[in-house]
Structure formats: C-alpha cells, structure tokens
Image (spheres, rainbow, N blue to C red):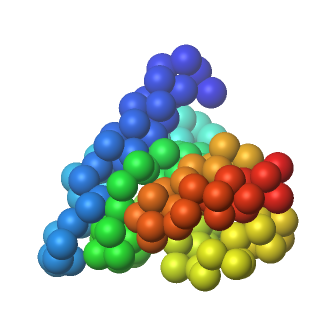
Amino acid sequence: MPLRGVRRCIWYVERIANTKWEVKELGMEHNGYVDLLLGEFKHYKTHLAHGGIRKEAQDLLSAYGLEIVAETLVEGLSRVKRCSDEGRALMSLDLQVLINGLRHFVSLNVKPKLQIVETFIKAYYLPETEYVHWARAHKEYSKSQIVGLVNLVATMKGWKRKTRLEVLEKIE
C-alpha cells in the first residue's frame, strides 16, 4: 500500500477513536467517518474499474480493500477511551450503514468481510468473566486491540483495578 494510503488509514483510525462515543441517546444518524469511508471506497473501485484490470483481479482487490476497511475500523474502535452502551449501539449503526453502502460498490458479499468488526463491537457486552476466554478464542485481533477493549470495558463498567489487571495478565 502506498505511503499515502497508510497515512489515510491512520487518519481514519484516529477519526474513529476520537469520535464521541459516550452518548446518552442513540439517534438515527450515523457518524461522518462512515460517509468518508464510503466515498474513499467508491473512489478505489472507480480506479479499479477504469484501470484496465481483469474482473477477477478487481474482485480480489475489492476483497482486499474490504479487509483493510475492516481492520481500520477494528483498530479505531480498539483505541476508544470512553463509550456508553448507546455509543456501542451507535458503532453497530455505523457498521450497518457502511455495509449497506459498500453493497452498492462490490459484487462480493460484504457482511462476512466485516464480521470481524461486528464481533469486536459485541464483545463490549460480555460479562467480565468471559474476556479471557474470548481473547483466546479470537486470534484475529492483535494484543493491543484486545487490551484496548478490556481497558475500555473496565473503565466504563466500573471494574476494580485488580480485576482489570488480572484479566489483562491472563490474556497476555
């Protein structure tokens, strides 16, 4: 991926991480980064379509692009510091809007490619006794992503410091 593309992914990670997730009510509006990601992906697909690339190669590159989108979302969400239950629901809304939008640009089934994001969002709701097992069962997430999730949940659910440290120690 060109350096410009890497910088853009980092920008999206930071944008997602710094979104206000500690909301009191879930509205009907998704966050602006979703529209920006959709525009970016449409631009990517347009370049593929007009680049003289065979359809099979375009499909492979589209699948790769979806994986980058999924990884960017997970990385951004793993860096969130404060989030309410309504904020987590907003994350799910953002993901659904993104999936529905991406379906207009690719012939692939989008949802399986972004399942990694949905699973990460839903992990917020696990009981504290399940995080060690969940982390061991989901090797698709990096250690820093899992640590970010546990730290967020511990903060927002009011875990005792000792509990948080024990969970993190068992995960590592």
Position above or below: 146 against 131: above
Residue 155 locus on image (x, y percent):
45, 59
Tell me which corner region of the image, top left, top right, bottom left or bottom right, holds residue 82: bottom left
Q: Answer yes or no: is residue 85 visible.
A: yes
Position above or below: 153 against 65: below
- Drawn side of residue 161 relative to residue 98, left or right: right
Of 143 and 94, the residue lying toward us: 143
Q: Answer yes or no: is residue 106 visible.
A: no
Residue 170 locus on image (x, y percent):
82, 58
Position above or below: 84 against 42: below
Residue found 75% across the figure and 72% down from its top:
134
Residue found 62% across the figure and 27% down from its top:
1
Residue 119 locus on image (x, y percent):
61, 73
Of 107 and 19, the residue lying toward us: 19
Residue found 73% across the figure and 47% down from its top:
143
Residue 127 locus on image (x, y percent):
61, 82
Of 81 and 69, the residue lying toward us: 81
- Drawn side of residue 35 relative to residue 162, left or right: left
Of 129 and 66, the residue lying toward us: 129
- Drawn side of residue 135 relative to residue 47, left or right: right
Residue found 47% across the figure and 31% down from its top:
10
Position above or below: 27 against 162: below
- Drawn side of residue 48 relative to residue 102, left or right: right
Q: How many marks?
A: 0
Tell me which corner region of the image, top left, top right, bottom left or bottom right, holds residue 3: top right
